[in-house]
């Protein structure tokens, strides 16, 4: 058995990506437009259904930035954002000169807590400012509490941007994640469930919104023979080369979801007998999680070890694992931002660990992971 590094989540090509790239080269479509861009957008629209329109962009972060612009978020506005997430969910709020207001998670999905969300809205309104938007995240592919979160959003008439960067292939009540929000974003970064090396998409409700996003993503050029601009634009469009990779990846997306769900089952079996280790799983059968990453939480009192001890042991075996996202309200860069809730996100960060979950992990890799973890239990029991 080899000792190559086992990664948390690495790119996994299906085989046809090169065919689409070769076509782009043969036709000299190397630009941020072309048949692969259109083809990839159509593939995504078909996959997501619900009549959405998709604009493919240079990253998920760019998609969130344009989403905030489309919702009219401006300097001085406030945007409510799930605290337990990757920094890219929150950074675009700052790009717009707005203020993030962070919201705690609830324990079942580890996503935005509807109760804390409503508390925040009421309090911000009492202080004289109605939040302009809500950013809710399907963390590690787990759908957030769709009905409860959208009920609060509707009650106060605040639009939701659904951060579905980690959740392509997940669904709730058979409806795909990425179709619930007023707008949604996807990411095709190198470690996501499918990748275009780097890339993202904004999912909109109609063609007009999509056209506006594409206009802003291509330098906001007015309709004139010369270069004329009435608005500030961005260079955020996806290239035809990256979109070619995306078209190949769409052919294997469902296989990737299947393989990652198999990894989740593999860990379920591995940890079944271990006291104090909880595998983060779907709370009900209405949830379908792509299990982009399998997450465990460890109760030190019961298990006798910490997530950091397990992480260091795996690292010695050349196996990558990683703490959960550190909540945004605990980040130095956001220390002055308001926060609503208690300690659910902070505790998840404290106790959690993400395990290798790639769709390309081999039987050998799984054996190595199982042996490393079993050895760790034996050693930690002896101490
Ligand atoms: C990856 C990710 C993003 C950003 O996507 P990029 O394509 O890397 O810019 C945003 N939100 C979450 C939750 C992510 O995991």
Image (cartoon, rainbow, N blue to C red):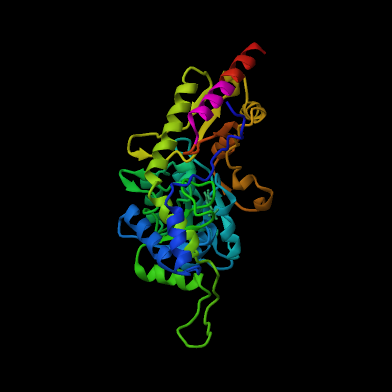
Q: Which residues are magenta?
A: 361-373
Frontmost residue, 305 versus 156? 305
Q: Position of residue 41 (x, y in %)?
A: 39, 61
**Residue beneath the point at 57% across and 60% down:** 92
Q: Relative to residue 3, is residue 68 depicted above or below? A: below
Residue 161 visible to the viewer: no
> Magenta includes 306?
no
**Residue beneath the point at 49% across and 57% down:** 200
**Residue beneath the point at 61% across and 42% down:** 326
Quadrant in which residue 1 is drawn: top right
- Residue extending farthest to the right is 332
Q: Is residue 161 left or right of residue 49?
A: right
> Magenta includes 369?
yes
Quarter of the figure that contains the C terminus: top right
Frontmost residue, 93 versus 141? 141
- Residue extending farthest to the front is 26
Q: Main secondary structure of the magenta part?
A: helix
Q: Position of residue 150 (x, y in %)?
A: 38, 51
Residue 333 visible to the viewer: yes
Q: Position of residue 248 (x, y in %)?
A: 42, 53
Q: Position of residue 25 (x, y in %)?
A: 48, 65
- Residue extending farthest to the top is 382
Frontmost residue, 183 versus 237? 237
Q: Relative to residue 182, is residue 342 depicted above or below? A: above
């Amino acid at each position: 058995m080899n000792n190559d590094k086992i990664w948390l989540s690495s790119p996994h090509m299906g085989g046809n990506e090169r065919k689409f790239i070769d076509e782009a080269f043969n036709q000299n479509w190397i630009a941020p437009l072309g048949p692969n861009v259109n083809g990839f957008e159509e593939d995504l629209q078909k996959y997501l259904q619900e009549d959405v329109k998709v604009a493919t962009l240079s990253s998920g972060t760019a998609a969130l930035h344009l989403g905030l612009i489309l919702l009219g978020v401006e300097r001085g506005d406030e945007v409510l954002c799930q605290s337990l997430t990757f920094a890219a969910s929150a950074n675009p709020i700052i790009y717009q000169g707005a203020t993030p207001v962070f919201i705690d998670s609830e324990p079942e999905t580890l996503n935005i807590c509807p109760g804390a969300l409503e508390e925040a809205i009421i309090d911000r309104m009492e202080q004289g400012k109605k939040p302009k938007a809500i950013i809710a995240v399907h963390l590690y592919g787990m759908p957030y509490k769709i009905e409860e979160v959208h009920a609060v959003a509707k009650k106060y008439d605040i639009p939701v941007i659904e951060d579905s960067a980690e959740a392509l292939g997940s669904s709730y009540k058979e409806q795909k994640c990425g179709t619930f929000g007023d707008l949604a974003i996807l990411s095709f970064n190198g470690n996501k469930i499918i990748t275009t090396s780097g890339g993202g998409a904004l999912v909109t409700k109609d063609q007009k919104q999509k056209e506006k996003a594409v206009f802003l993503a291509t330098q906001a050029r007015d309709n004139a023979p010369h270069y004329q601009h009435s608005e500030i634009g961005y260079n955020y469009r996806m290239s035809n080369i990256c979109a070619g990779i995306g078209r190949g990846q769409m052919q294997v997306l469902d296989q990737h979801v299947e393989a990652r769900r198999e990894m989740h089952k593999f860990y379920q079996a591995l940890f079944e007998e271990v006291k104090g280790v909880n595998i983060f799983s779907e709370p009900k059968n209405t949830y379908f999680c792509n299990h982009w990453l399998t997450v465990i939480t460890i109760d030190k009192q019961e298990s006798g070890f910490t997530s950091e001890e397990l992480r260091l042991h795996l690292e010695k075996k050349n196996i990558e694992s990683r703490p959960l996202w550190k909540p945004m309200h605990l980040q130095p860069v956001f220390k002055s931002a308001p926060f609503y809730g208690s300690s659910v996100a902070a505790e998840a960060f404290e106790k959690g660990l993400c395990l290798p979950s790639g769709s390309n992990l081999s039987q050998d890799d799984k054996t190595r992971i199982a042996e490393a973890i079993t050895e760790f239990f034996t050693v930690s029991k002896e101490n």
